[in-house]
């Protein structure tokens, strides 16, 4: 499945949740979708647990 189709399905799910369940359901579906996306990337091997806890180097301002 291409990313365009996955985005289309996610948008439709959010639209239905917003229409039938209101704003709270929209936020819940969006949050669970984001969690599922990160979990899927982790299981595919695109992310590692160390990427969440490792400090970024070279991008910070050294004036502090």
Image: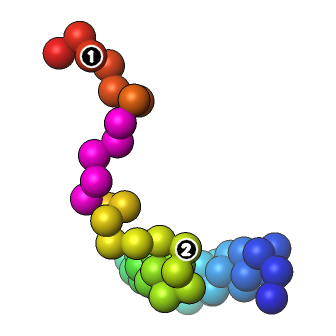
Q: Nearer the viewer, residue 35 or 16?
A: 35
Q: Is residue 49 left or right of residue 27?
A: left
| Of 42 and 23, the residue lying toward us | 42
Can the viewer see residue 18 in this picture? no
Task: Kindly identify the residue that appears in the image at 73 percent across and 81 percent down.
Answer: 6
Q: Which residue is mark 2?
A: 46
Which one is earlier in the sequence, the residue at label 1 or at label 2? 2
Residue placed most toward the observer, 26 or 57: 57
Q: Residues within 10 Å of mark 2 (few under 14, many from 20)?
A: few
| Distance between the alpha carbons at the discs numbered 1 and 2 | 30 Å
Spot occupied by residue 33 in the image (x, y as percentages of width and height): 50, 80
Tag 1 residue: 62
| Picture coordinates of residue 44, whole percent (x, y) | 56, 85
Q: Quadrant of the N terminus?
A: bottom right
Q: How is the image coloured?
A: rainbow
Name which residue lies at 59% across and 79% down.
14
- Residue range of the region highlighted in magenta in the rendering: 53-57
């Amino acid at each position: 499945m291409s990313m365009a189709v996955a985005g289309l399905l996610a948008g439709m799910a959010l639209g239905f949740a917003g229409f039938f369940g209101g704003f709270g359901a929209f936020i819940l579906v969006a949050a669970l979708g984001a969690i599922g996306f990160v979990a899927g990337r982790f299981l595919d091997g695109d992310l590692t647990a160390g990427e969440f806890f490792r400090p970024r180097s070279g991008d910070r301002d050294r004036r502090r």
